[in-house]
Image (cartoon, grey):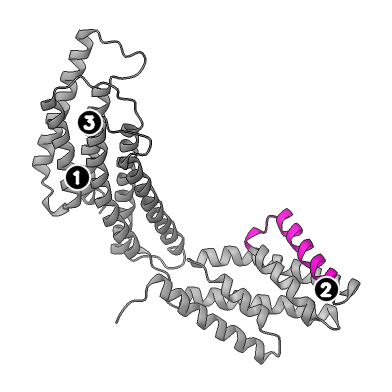
Amino acid sequence: MKKFTIAGSRILKTAVAIFLTAFICEFLNWPPVFAVITAIVTIEPTVSESIRKGIIRFPASAIGSAFAVLSISLFGNSALTYTLAGTLTIVTCSKLRLHAGLLVATITAVAMVEVIHDNYFLAFLIRLGTTTIGLLVSTAVNMFMLPPNYTRNIEQGIETIRKKVGQSIECVFEEVLQYKKTGGSQSIRLLEELNQTIRKAEMFIQFQKEESKYHPLVDSKKQEFLLAQEKLHLLRLIHYHLENLINTTMDTIPWSSKDKEQVFLAAKQLQYTLQHHENFNLTTHEEQIEKIATRLWQDNEDITKGGHNHSTSFPPELIIMYELISIYSLVERFYTERDHVL
């Protein structure tokens, strides 16, 4: 059976929530339009989000209904009535920080002006009843029908980020070693795009955490989810080290062309490893880390003996080697973290 996408599941659940809400309201002989509006906006990415915003939208809708009744009782059905009901609702909800329910409450306030003719108090109570129906139905549908599951989105996101990180590593080291770094460089653009992709994956992680309160993952899936969180964290750290490199002033690097080529080849190896994960070899990787570490200490001794003066900042060659070895260590953890998490 073909699985629904997140968007497809949400559309289907919204349709079911609309039907059930309207059916219940018609059975009670209550106007369904306000309940349906509430049901539509209460279908959120997670059950906990539906409940949290539902708790906010109920009092907000009550405020909108109350101002609608008050305005029409004072001025009848007029332009001033719509203006007063909408404005008072917006101001009050803003003051009470009911921002999640502000839009629905305002729509409710102005829409009620048209349908209230007499018995204002009864109209107010019915409005609260329809709001309650919309909230309960949409929350129940979100909880029991096609429960949100973001694990596949998280896994796909990590795969995409892994490849983008590899591309970014190659580009950053090429620009740093060849002095191509500018305000509008390709590496800066790649890192900005990578940051957006990581943030999207982090959002799905948060959604899944919230959803697990109501639909806990089985043990195997829970372990995989913990592993995914850790891998995403490691990719975020690599992004951090790349930003350090590209944002550090490196006007002069006292390396020969051969030295630069060796460093770039080491970065290129990282790029290849991340974009072709099946070719990761732990032994080869550890040997490369040892070579870089040896070179780092050698540079450190040369600089110390030579009495170089770089003010309070580290010399650029040490920064490059430190960031490179840090990234190598993080890539190793990325591919071996399963042994520690599972």
Tell me if mark 3 has few (under 14), some (14-19) or many (20+) residues whose alpha carbon lies within 10 angstroms of its own: few
Residue type (three-letter) at the residue carrying disc 3: Gln
SS label for mark 3: helix
Above or below 23: residue 102: above
Residue at image position (56%, 82%) is 18
Which label lies toward us, 1 or 2?
Answer: 1
Pointer 2 residue: 69
SS category of the residue bearing label 2? helix
Residue drawn at (57%, 75%) of the image = 40
The residue tagged 3 is 178
In the rendered structure, which disc, 3 or 2, sits on the residue that comes first in sequence? 2
Q: Position of residue 38 (x, y in %)?
A: 62, 74
Quadrant for the N terminus, please.
Answer: bottom left
Q: Residue at x 69, y 71 (%)?
A: 107
Of the two numbered discs 1 and 3 in the rendering, the one whose residue sits closer to the viewer:
3
Q: Position of residue 117 (x, y in %)?
A: 84, 83
Q: Secondary structure at mark 1?
A: helix
- The three-letter code of the residue at mark 1 reads Gln
Distance between mark 1 and mark 3 Cα atoms: 17 Å
Q: Position of residue 85 (x, y in %)?
A: 79, 67
Between the C-alphas of marks 3 and 2, the distance is 71 Å
**Residue 94 located within the stretch drawn in magenta:** yes
**Bounds of the magenta segment:** 79-100
Splitting the image into 4 quarters, where does residue 222 fall? Answer: bottom left
Locate residue 209: give its quadrant. Answer: bottom left
Q: Which residue is mark 1?
A: 271
Characterize the local packing of mark 1: few (<14), some (14-19) or many (20 or more) Cα atoms within 10 angstroms. many
Q: Nearer the viewer, residue 311 or 326?
A: 311
**Which numbered disc flags the more N-terminal residue, 1 or 3?**
3
Residue appearing at x 25%, y 54% in the figure: 342
Residue 107 vertical position relative to residue 249 in the rendered view, above or below:
below
Q: Is tag 1's residue or tag 2's residue first in the polypeptide sequence?
A: 2
